[in-house]
Image (cartoon, coloured by chain):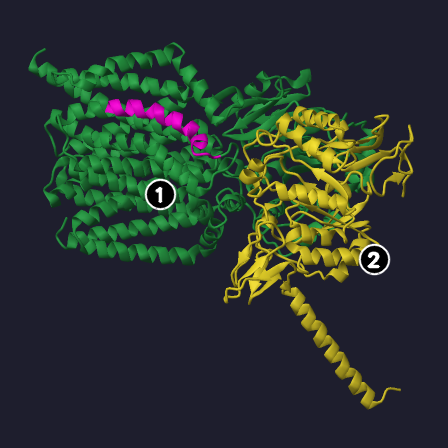
Amino acid sequence: MRGGERHATSMLSARAAIILLGVACITAQTVLLRELLVQYHGNEFSVGVILGNWVAASALGAFLAGRRTWQGGPVHSFIRLTFLVSLLFPLSIALCRTFKPLAGIPHGMGLTLAQIFCSSLLLLLPTAALLGGQFVVATKLYARFSGDEERAPGRAYALDAAGTMAGGLLSTSLLVPLLSPLQVAALLLLLGGGCSLALSRGVGGETGVARVLPSLMLLAALMLCAGGAGWVERMTLALQWQGREVLASRNSPYQNITVLRDEGQLTVYTDGLPFTTFPDPDTASLEELAHLPALVHPDPRVVLLVGGSAGGIPPELLKHPSIERIDCLEIDPLLLETVTSFGRLTPAAGAGDGRVRLHLVDGRRFLRTGDGGYDLVLLNSPLPLSLQANRYFTREFFLLVRERLRPGGLLAFAAPGSTAYYSPDLKAITATLTATAAAVFPSVRVIPGESNLFLAFPEKGVELPGAPLLARRLQERGIRALLVTPEHLSWRLDRSQAEWFAGSMAGARGGPNRDFTPRLFSADLAQSTALLNPWLAPLLTAAARSGSAGLAGVALGVLALFSVAGRGRSSVAIPLLVASSGLAAMLLELILIMAFQVCSGVMFQAIALLIALFMGGLCCGSLVSAGRPAADYHRLMAGEAGLLVLAALLFALFSWEQGTPVSPLMATGVVMPLLFAAGFCTGMEFPPAVRLLQRDEDGRVGGGVGRVYAADLLGGWFGGVYGGMILPFLGFRWSCALLVSLKLAGMVLLKMQRKQGKL
Amino acid sequence: MITRRTFLQTLCLSSLALKAQALEMARDASGRREALWYQRVDDGRGTVRCQLCPRRCTIPEGATGFCRARQNVAGRLCSLGYNLPCSLNVDPVEKKPFFNFYPGTRSFSLACAGCNLRCKFCQNWEISQISPLQAANRYTPTSQLPSLARGQGCRSIAFTYTEPTTYYEYMTDSARAARKAGLLAVYHSNGFINPEPLDHLCKHLDGANIDLKGFSEEFYATVCEARLAPVLESLKRLKRGGVWLEITNLVIPGYNDTPRMIGDMCGWIRQNLGAETPLHFPRFFPLYKMTAIQPTPVKTLEGAREIAMGAGLKYVYIGNVPGHPGNSTYCPRCRKQVIRRSGFSVLSVELKGDRCRFCNERIDGAGLITGGTRI
């Protein structure tokens, strides 16, 4: 091969390697996130902590790599790091599954926030730090082949972002649904190994590691194709579930679904928590939700069941002879398929009953687009620990339900109650639910108990029928239930219970739960936090209550800090600015993704597209500002101003919320363009920040990149932790206000630096 | 006609009486009644040692014990929950659970915050794992309880939901008041109490349901932060003390569900407490810190019931599975159903006095029903 051709091939290999690095980064992050979510039982808090720790570990890797002098040049260093990532990524997957027994944590126990924080940091550190360091080496690699040190960071950043964008799409649409996590690791090893070999040949010599790569790739191929991964998969799953019999473990676009068997009883887990169990179900909750509302209605004919139809409610409902049709709404087809494949009678199997119709669709979409009215709408969803679930308990959703209720119809849902004590958290949950229903329905009645049953009627002044009438209807309809008997009805509707409930709830206040003011989600999260982290709950509640006053204090503090930094050296001011943009970017991305979820409910399906849009914006932004070093200050200023405007726009949008259901079109028409714009503004800042820092320090390419990248990721880490821990309590609106003040402070900092001639 | 002098005298006396009552109320409402069963430590710093439960906490001035319900106030150990229950409600007695004790009656149930164990599957963690100082309490002097219970048609007063041992003084005084008013006094406890206080308590109780949470020291240590031996000792003492005793063993998959552990436990009950001691096996559902454990398979509960009956126990129940045949009471001789239940509801009774209507065998228990009449 001639020199020119070799150079062209090497340049191509370098580009491919950097793109692949982006793919590996997002894929490894997604796979490990999902593995950890199962371990942390889908705790919404943990998502922010995991993402935050990932970027912190990447920042550490980038920082260390920037300071290190690499032996043997960037090509061999890049290959060595690829080799290490290939080994440590699958090992991290295995460790994610087995760390609980290794750490002596008994099976089935929830983890405290401290345990979640420490374990996720330790488990993510090897892979994330190596990938972070690899990016710094990749910029050197690009600089070496392109010969343009000045533009190399920006170009490498753009290529990496393009890889992340492609990887986001690829992993969500293909890799995660089709391959097991270990197969994904094997595939990445094959691709990374191939790229490394090409790079190695491009510089005309194979190092020790490059010589080992083919054997490793062969092993990966075996893992991928010959069932090796399946064997390791089974072994690690057995360790994860601590000896219990695992019948299946699958990943849907929404969650991990695992089926365990014990003494013939099958339990389906979603993200590590029991979802349903059979053949002996939780009879009490099934029968109460199915029969009590149906008995309250004098003649129920058409029923809508939102969620949980695999749990056995339809067969109970069908015991009421008047019922002509049950529309069951489910959002995750794989969950239903899994439950059905193990013999559970679902509406899909329908026990051959044509009255049950299954719709694989989001409940809000169904209510908005379908037609016809219902006598009963049963909301069978656990209380929200995610925004996805919160969408079914908002004023906006209840408005949709009311429009579809026939005269005399009712909405029913259950929520945790107590016959012993109403703690402040439980009171807040109950009061919020009551206020939300009362904001839409003129009559709201609660049948109190261990599980409170809420019944909401569109007519004024509706009173609950007494136990004797319900018992008569039970008898007339010929219903034979295990729990719901005349005696049980008499107890459930006993006056003493209602009086005790009213007394316990005296003085409890709660505002309605809304799409962008998710009070119920916050209250539920506070309760689950108090359960495992009693010390944390008061802090978060105080943060939520501090509202605008607390926010003003924080904003002033930020402004003061940035003003001091503005007078100091650029080597401090620029990384601080980049860190604040990293924070703003991560937080805006999270807020917009959550807003998308609120509007459309299909975030999990579209997550790849959403990430891709953000990364696309990031890529375009960094490409736009990769050239023309003379305009660096203006580019930075434009980036800051752009982020400020976006935050202000979102603040206005969330303040404007009127309580009417948000159109799903907002998800595509508003949220998606804003995601791209947020990425674009953030991306614009990276190349000028690196150049300004280099100019100030007159340093090496890697050093400047490492510091800026580390600052960016560190800000992102804080944004992730904030998004997971504080955002649900402070809310969307005030978080956007905080971002406005942060970016305003950033602009002040830039202005001061400029005034002092440092930029 | 009342004279001016008499009027002033009456006024003064009434004021003094009201003042005394107010002071008494203030003292009671503070919840800080001096505790029984403690001793002062001779360290010159006012430290005390609680002697109520086997932890025997050494409590410095100002601190509370492990249970969070007993505080050292200026060198005196005080019970913080006295007269301050955080929970007052009416339940079927079957919910405690008592199945061979006044079936079908209501029980006025109360609790003060606090517990001397740390079970990771606690159902009432929101009140058991806090101090009475943190809970929303309702001032309820012992003298009010009987009328409250009677007003709700209750046959008994039950100390339940949290650990009654932690409000020992309020419990004993309330039990005394209940009995005086012709009501029964029962408690649901973890049995983690020292022998002397328990012997004293037995004099005031009619029924006890004790959680025998598992049958190994390891289970108690890892899941409850406690010990098994003192609980076994309590069970024996309650039996000797003439208190009607029922036992609850919540079966948690993977923790206390091996046939061997259940067999050992049933053998011990048979030998030490007698075959007539009812044993309840409720089904576990994910709770508190044990959120990721599957509900107990009904077959496991049925297996446990078979083991218990095989060990000679006469009354073995399955709980939290409404409609299961194991909810009902069977005659130990002819095996026919004598009290049919679903969940906590009593559906029918086939008793003649306290005897089986089919074979005339005596059914062990207290207050059993015959044709709707209590005996």
B219 or A287, which is in the foreground? B219
* Residue at screen point 34% across, 50% down: A740
Q: Colour of chain A?
A: green
Residue A92 falls within the magenta-colored stretch: yes
- Dot 1 surroundings within 10 Å: few (below 14), some, or many (20 or more)? many
Q: Is residue A412 above or below residue B302?
A: below
Q: Is residue A624 left or right of residue B109?
A: left
Q: Identify the amino acid type marked 1.
A: Gly
* Badge 1 and badge 2 both on one subunit: no
- Dot 2 corresponds to which residue? B181
Q: Quadrant of residue A284?
A: top right
* Disc 1 to disc 2, C-alpha distance: 63 Å
- Residue at 43 percent of width and 44 percent of height: A725
Q: Which residue is mark 1?
A: A719
Magenta residue span? A82-105
Q: Measuring 57% from the left and 58% from the top, which residue is drawn there?
A: B49
Q: Colour of chain B?
A: yellow
- Please tell me whether mark 2 sits on a helix, a strand or a loop: loop
Q: Residue B128, percent across and down?
A: 60, 49
Mark number, residue A488: none
Quadrant for residue A309, please give it.
Answer: top right
Crowding near pointer 2: few (<14 within 10 Å), some, many (20+)? Answer: some
Q: Residue B184 appears at what percent x and percent y? A: 80, 51
Looking at numbered disc 2 in the image, what kind of residue is underneath it? Ala
Q: What secondary structure is the magenta-colored segment mainly?
A: helix
From the viewer's side, name the closer residue of A587 and A372: A587
Question: Is A145 drawn above or below residue B152 in the view shown?
Answer: above
Residue A462 visible here? no
Horizontally, residue A196 falls left or right of residue A111, namely: left
